[in-house]
Amino acid sequence: MWNPNLLLLMPSLVSFGAKSGTKVARKFLYSRLILSYIESMNQFTVRFQKSLAALRTAPWRVRGILNGKAVRNHYWTRERAELEARALDKQVRANGEKAAACPAGVIHDALEGLEIIAGCPGNATLIEACKFYARHHDVRAKSILVSEAWKQYIPYYERRVERGEVRSKSWESVRKVVAHFERDNGESQVCDWAPLKIKGWLDGLKTREGKPFSVGSINSYRLNLSGFFTFCVDNAWLAVHPMKDKKVRALRNLAAREKLPEIFTVEQLTKLLEVAQATDPQIIVPIVLGAFAGIRPTEAWKMDWSMIKWDRQIVDVPASIAKTADWREVPISPNLREWLAPYRKEKGPVFAGRQANLIARISAAGKAIGVTEWPEDVLRHSYGSFHYAATENVEATIARMGHKSGLQIFFKHYRNRRSKEEGKAYFEIRPQLVPLPQLAAA
């Protein structure tokens, strides 16, 4: 059956054939244009299927070709099948008329576009490429400068802190990182930041001494910067979150994985407490809370005496001060009770002073016993190691430490580091060196 619409196609075919004779062009013509007319000459047929399989499903079948693909739909009634066949015939004729009206220049552009995306990874279609362009163009029209996004990000994050969604300390870290990013890239458009561009900026970071950032610092920057780009995506200044691409994934810190946290020996901790008693008694309570209850220095600085429950013999660490924002309770051991008793109060800060001052004073006591550089959370790590050695109870130690990762992080850092005898000796360190009540009163 001849379709008169084929006559409309001839000028386009002749004009286009003069411009291009490539295999891609011929493939496109046959698979896109000619096929549309072949389809338009064939009507969808309706047939009753007599097989048992068809009778169990739907016996009336509609069959034909649409967009180069065979169509076989099944229906229970003849009326419904014929109605669907007429609708499909109408759609096929519409496709054929569109193809006939297609100018030669548009066909040529389409072929060039297909050749371009053929060299790209993946199996993208021409339609997908056009949709990507439209979306990207729309985002660029809405995008703003990084400096402007940063100005809007500040009040947004401060509101989250006020509502209690995040901690003020977290905001300090985020503010430092994003402010650094804004100083370096404030005049660029937010939508221009692709994964590889961000990776290049992170890899190029240097310290004040001109040394490259450590793996840990780069991962920290990556984490804090990710929230900023989430904010940008939420505001439609960016189509896709660039930090979620595998090209900007967190780096593996092999040195940190192989290095176990440092801990004090029984002798080192005894000497540290001797020095603190003799030179700076005000740091005794934060030290023993870390050494005998696993309290971090940042947590001890925020603690109030009301969190030490004498009636229940526990140290209550609320989520508001815990690093992981999870509440935990730590039983008060007999030797810890003896250390705390002379300084006992009903309420008030455990340490009256700034956090930096507390850490500096504890570090000074450490230097007096030969610890030139204070290891991070060394008192807490010592508690975890010696508590497990003394009790051989994994669950109890994990609960007191508040490890969210459970056994994985525990066995990595604390298992088999000290003997049971050493563990018992550790929790026998008691205040027998100096009359503590006199020091407390001094």
Image: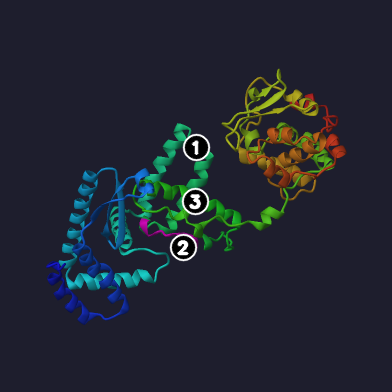
Residue extent of the magenta highlight: 191-201
Q: Quadrant of the C terminus?
A: top right
Tell me if 130 is positioned left or right of 275 in this view. left
Name the chief secondary structure element in magenta.
helix
Tell me if 36 is positioned left or right of 115 in this view. left
Dot 1 or dot 2, earlier in sequence: 1
Q: Secondary structure at mark 3?
A: helix
The verdict on residue 423 being magenta is: no
- Type of the residue with mark 1: Val
Residue matched to label 2 = 196
Front one among 403 and 357: 403
Instruction: Specify few, some or many for label 3: CA neighbours under 10 Å numbering under 14, 14-19, or 20 or more.
Output: some
Q: CA distance from mark 1 to mark 3?
A: 16 Å
Dot 2 or dot 3, earlier in sequence: 3
Residue matched to label 1 = 166
- Type of the residue with mark 2: Leu
Residue matched to label 3 = 177
| Residue at (20% x, 60% y) in the render | 95
- Location of residue 211 in the rendering, given as x and y in whole percent from the top left corner: 59, 63
- As drawn, 256 above or below 171: below
Instruction: Specify few, some or many for label 2: CA neighbours under 10 Å numbering under 14, 14-19, or 20 or more.
Output: some
Outermost residue on the right side: it is 421
Q: Quadrant of the N terminus?
A: bottom left
Dot 1 or dot 3, earlier in sequence: 1
